Image (cartoon, rainbow, N blue to C red):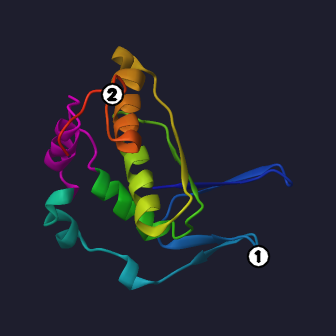
Amino acid sequence: MGILKINKEKNSVRKQNYLNYIFEEKSNSLIQVNNYNMIMNTLEFSNNNSFSNVNGTKVLSEFRINFSYPKPHELIKTLIKLKLDNKNVKVLDFFAGSGTTGHAVLELNKEDGGNRTFTLVTNNENNIGIDVNYERLYRINHGIGSKGETFEW
């Protein structure tokens, strides 16, 4: 996981790649954090079925969307919560795929009243942007398919 911090006034971009550091705006520096209650160990991750690709596939099948090996949105939600405690953060995903990151951000906002935004980027191979990504996010936002079709949750 990495974080980009863009400062338009100073015309600069900072990139953060480590979960144990935070960027402090006032001092314009990275500060190491040892907040162990934010960190999940490998065993917790491996024993959590909601973090498996199988669960990602199950969620998409509930939306009647076929996609191979989607990231599980519960994992992405957990990663966002681990590091990005700002409820107004902008999340960028250059490999949008099936829209999992957007799904995770929308659910987090619903759960905690946040105002996070997301930008998803895709090469639109096989029309994935419209057929999968857009359709998934539309169904999450509206509760029906983009053509008015209903589905079981």
Residue in front for this viewpoint, 112 or 150: 150
CB-based contact (under 8 Å), mark 2 and mark 1: no
Does the stretch in magenta take in 69? yes
Magenta segment, which residues?
A: 51-72
Residue in front for this viewpoint, 44 or 105: 105
- At 86% from the left edge and 54% from the top edge, which residue is drawn? 9
Q: CA distance from mark 2 to mark 1?
A: 42 Å
Does the stretch in magenta take in 23? no
In which quadrant of the rendered image does the N terminus lie? bottom left
Residue 57, horizontal then vertical, whole percent: 18, 40
Name the element at disc 1: loop
Badge 1 amino acid: Ser
Question: How many residues crowd around disc 2 within 10 Å: few (fewer than 14), some, or many (20 or more)?
Answer: many
Task: Looking at this view, name the residue that lies furthest to the top.
Answer: 126
For the residues carrying marks 2 and 1, which lies nearer the camera in this image?
A: 2
Residue 5, horizontal then vertical, whole percent: 67, 56
Q: Which residue is under mark 1?
A: 27
Residue 104, horizontal then vertical, whole percent: 38, 52
Answer above or below: position of 56 versus 96: below
Q: Which residue is under mark 2?
A: 132
Of pointers 2 and 1, the one earlier in the residue sequence: 1
Residue in front for this viewpoint, 106 or 152: 152
Answer above or below: position of 61 versus 53: above
- At 52% from the left edge and 58% from the top edge, which residue is drawn? 17
Q: Is residue 99 visible?
A: no
Q: Is residue 12 left or right of residue 118?
A: right
